[in-house]
């Protein structure tokens, strides 16, 4: 059995799809620590624009929306994302059409799940991201999302915080989106040292007071709160931090 | 700068309004401005009572001249009073929004002076927020009954959503419990706004209340039946084009000979929301769900209760039943129904397919066939028992949030 190992990029993934398409028993993954069995052989995928473009063009001809969703799925933290996307692509070529609504096919359900976890987390973090105001006025939001979504959040915040400067920092992946009041870019970012503006603590405390006051203490329903706002996000929420 | 105590008083006074939604408006940001609307709405936090925080929900003042029987801020109540200025509201909104704490503002007020003056101050505040602070995020503004319609219209052009609270489900109850408010003082401005929205849409604009109007009423403080309440909601949806009617279960915190001494029970509120949902999204009419002078069944959710009364229509074949009928199967929601109608274009669906498609079959199995095969219980009595068991765990789950409702220290509606 061959294990096609990609570097995690879309280019590498689509190249691997080209190479592995007819290799029915193969595994496609970007996990370097993949479990090896006795008969397995690792194939390091060499990214190839031509192969990548051929697969994408083929997909585009059969299903206009597939490429966008596949790119979304590759942002997932699911270790089976490449394998699932490969099977999804095979289905599109087998049926020669979009398979998104064929909910009776297990691979379709799995693929749709992975995509909706990515878009779902993006939506959630549009709400749960928290900015801290630094002494220079730049807003800084550290977080560690499950999936690689920082560049999906950037346009949303650039539109609403148009005249501000801000940074969204994914501490897990050591990358950051930076907006300077005009345009945004992505870059690598290890650690950041932030000096707070003189107002930061005041508004943070007002917010904590608001959070406490707006709760109806006599109607506790912690389970529902945690269902909607998972505990792993609390670390960066001032109202839940202590 | 606003102090924490003032914020606490004005939040405590506002928090019993159930509306929290920030959806329905795609307002764009302006050059040099801050904020925009997100059409689907965004929740920014959740409190330990399980409710979402989307908007900064606050009163400008809780110093009320009215003496509504059920309200903790009524004139004769002995509670701490406070007010804030328009600039304080604006500064708070801008700073909370910038840090992504909130999606916008839900502003209301007690009637601290004449209704006109109160509405003017609310309007002045949102005007300042829009024009001076250039804030383009979501604003929900409470309408003040008896206020000058010209001021109300001015406000409606500035904000995304407005709401006049119906308060009680009949005119008699309103007269008894909130004598300073009349049916007309609530419905006239609602109609005025509806007509303004209609004119706006005809002219292909979306200036006036892009997210429409909502209302709220208290359930169980007065004797109206669920049937009457739902008829009222149906009329409000139809005639006033409301986006939502919120129901707020009565909690006895204010001692009064005019009010019941026990709460309405939160199961009733839950059932009303379920019925409301069926009317808006599932093509049911009130008459099908609940007779005029009756209440909804506490044991079965309204869709189950309807299905049990109409067993002659079931079972329906999952592979051929029209969408409207699938929507009427207990346990099958809109998403599931849609998933079924899409998937069956490509294959004949069996029972195993449905399970894999994440269709919940606990209730539905008694009302469907898959490829002609029936997987439910045979007799009506068995079906009823199965549905009772299925419903019980769910209701307990839903209602645990209200478990200590009777010990609530504040009343149910902190405003108006």
Image (spheres, grey):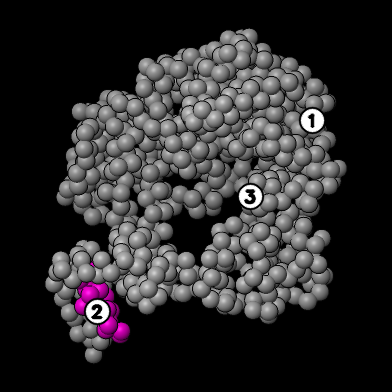
In-image side of B36 versus B75 (left or right): left
x and y, in percent, of residue B369 in the image: 68, 75
How many numbered discs? 3
Quadrant housing residue A113: bottom left
Q: What whole-number distance in Å separates the C-alpha atoms at marks 2 and 1?
A: 69 Å
Lower position in the chain sequence, tag 1 or tag 3: 1
Which residue is label 1 attached to? B170
Q: What is the number of the mark on residue B88? A: none
Above or below: residue B396 compared with residue A39: above
| Dots 3, 2 in contact, CB < 8 A | no
Considering every residue shown, the one lying at the far front of the view is B203
In-image side of A213 versus A120 (left or right): right
Which residue is label 2 attached to? A20
Q: Dot 3: within a 10 Å radius of its alpha carbon, few (fewer than 14), some, or many (20 or more) residues?
A: few
Q: Nearer the viewer, residue A73 or B400?
A: A73
Q: Secondary structure at mark 3?
A: helix
Write down the chain letter for disc 2: A
Quadrant where the N terminus of chain A sits is bottom left
Please say whether residue B407 is visible from this viewpoint: no
x and y, in percent, of residue B407 in the image: 68, 38
Query: Do the residues at pointers 2 and 1 share their chain?
Result: no
The residue lying at 21 percent from left, 50 percent from top is: A175
Q: Nearer the viewer, residue A221 or A168?
A: A168
Q: Which residues are magenta?
A: A13-28
- Nearest to the eye among marks 1 and 3: give it: 3
Which residue is label 3 attached to? B281
| Dots 2, 1 in contact, CB < 8 A | no
Quadrant housing residue B217: top right
Write down the chain letter for disc 1: B
Please say whether residue B115 is visible from this viewpoint: yes
């Amino acid at each position: 059995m061959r294990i096609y190992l990609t570097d995690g990029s879309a280019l590498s993934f689509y190249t691997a799809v080209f190479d592995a398409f007819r290799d029915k028993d193969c595994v496609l993954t970007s996990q370097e620590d993949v479990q090896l069995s006795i008969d397995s052989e690792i194939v390091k995928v060499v990214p190839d624009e031509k192969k990548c473009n051929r697969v994408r063009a083929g997909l585009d001809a059969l299903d206009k929306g597939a490429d966008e969703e596949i790119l979304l799925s590759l942002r997932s933290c699911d270790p089976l994302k490449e394998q699932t996307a490969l099977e999804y692509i095979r289905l599109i070529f087998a049926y020669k059409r979009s398979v998104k609504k064929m909910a009776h096919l297990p691979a379709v359900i799995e693929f749709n799940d992975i995509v909706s976890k990515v878009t779902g987390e993006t939506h959630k973090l549009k709400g749960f991201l928290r900015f801290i105001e630094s002494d220079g006025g730049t807003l800084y939001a550290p977080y560690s999302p499950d999936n690689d979504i920082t560049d999906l959040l950037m346009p949303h915040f650039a539109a609403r915080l148009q005249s501000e400067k801000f940074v969204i920092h994914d501490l897990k992946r050591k990358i950051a989106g930076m907006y300077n009041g005009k345009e945004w870019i992505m870059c690598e970012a290890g650690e950041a040292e932030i000096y707070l503006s003189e107002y930061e603590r005041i508004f943070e405390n007002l917010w904590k007071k608001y959070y406490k006051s707006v709760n109806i203490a006599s109607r506790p329903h912690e389970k529902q709160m945690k269902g909607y706002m998972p505990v792993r996000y609390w670390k960066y929420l001032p109202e839940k931090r202590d | 700068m606003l102090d924490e105590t003032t914020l606490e008083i004005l939040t405590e006074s506002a928090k019993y309004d159930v509306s929290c939604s920030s959806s329905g408006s795609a307002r764009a940001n302006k050059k040099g401005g801050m904020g925009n609307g997100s059409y689907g709405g965004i929740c920014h936090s959740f409190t330990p009572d399980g409710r979402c925080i989307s908007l900064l929900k606050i009163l400008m003042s809780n110093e009320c001249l009215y003496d509504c029987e059920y309200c903790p801020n009524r004139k004769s109540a002995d509670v701490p009073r406070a007010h804030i200025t328009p600039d304080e509201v604006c500064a708070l909104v801008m700073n909370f929004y910038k840090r992504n704490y909130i999606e916008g503002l839900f502003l209301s007020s007690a009637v601290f002076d004449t209704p006109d003056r109160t509405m003017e101050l609310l309007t002045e505040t949102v005007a300042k927020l829009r024009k001076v602070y250039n804030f383009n995020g979501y604003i929900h503004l409470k309408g003040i009954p008896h206020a000058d319609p010209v001021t109300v219209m001015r406000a409606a052009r500035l904000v995304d959503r407005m709401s006049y609270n119906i308060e009680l489900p009949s005119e008699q109850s309103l007269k008894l419990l909130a004598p300073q408010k009349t049916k007309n003082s609530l419905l006239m401005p609602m109609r005025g706004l509806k007509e303004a929205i209609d004119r706006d849409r005809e002219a292909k604009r979306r200036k006036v209340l892009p997210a429409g109007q909502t209302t709220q009423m208290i359930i169980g403080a007065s004797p109206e039946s669920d049937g009457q309440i739902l008829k009222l909601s149906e009329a409000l949806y139809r005639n006033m084009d409301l986006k939502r009617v919120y129901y707020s279960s009565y909690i006895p915190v204010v001692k009064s000979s005019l009010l019941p001494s026990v709460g309405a029970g939160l199961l009733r509120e839950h059932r009303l929301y379920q019925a409301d949902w069926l009317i808006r999204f599932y093509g049911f009419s009130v008459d099908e769900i609940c007779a005029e002078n009756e209440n909804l069944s506490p044991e079965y959710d309204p869709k189950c209760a309807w299905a049990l009364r109409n067993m002659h229509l079931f079972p329906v074949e999952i592979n051929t039943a029209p969408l409207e009928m699938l929507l009427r199967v207990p346990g099958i929601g809109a998403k599931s129904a849609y998933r079924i109608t899409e998937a069956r274009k490509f294959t004949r669906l069996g029972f195993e397919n449905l399970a894999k498609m994440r269709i919940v079959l606990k209730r539905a199995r008694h009302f469907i066939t898959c490829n002609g095969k029936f997987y439910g219980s045979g007799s009506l009595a068995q079906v009823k028992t199965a549905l009772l068991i299925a419903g019980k765990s769910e209701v307990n789950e839903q209602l645990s949030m209200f478990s200590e409702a009777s010990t609530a220290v504040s009343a149910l509606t902190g405003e108006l």
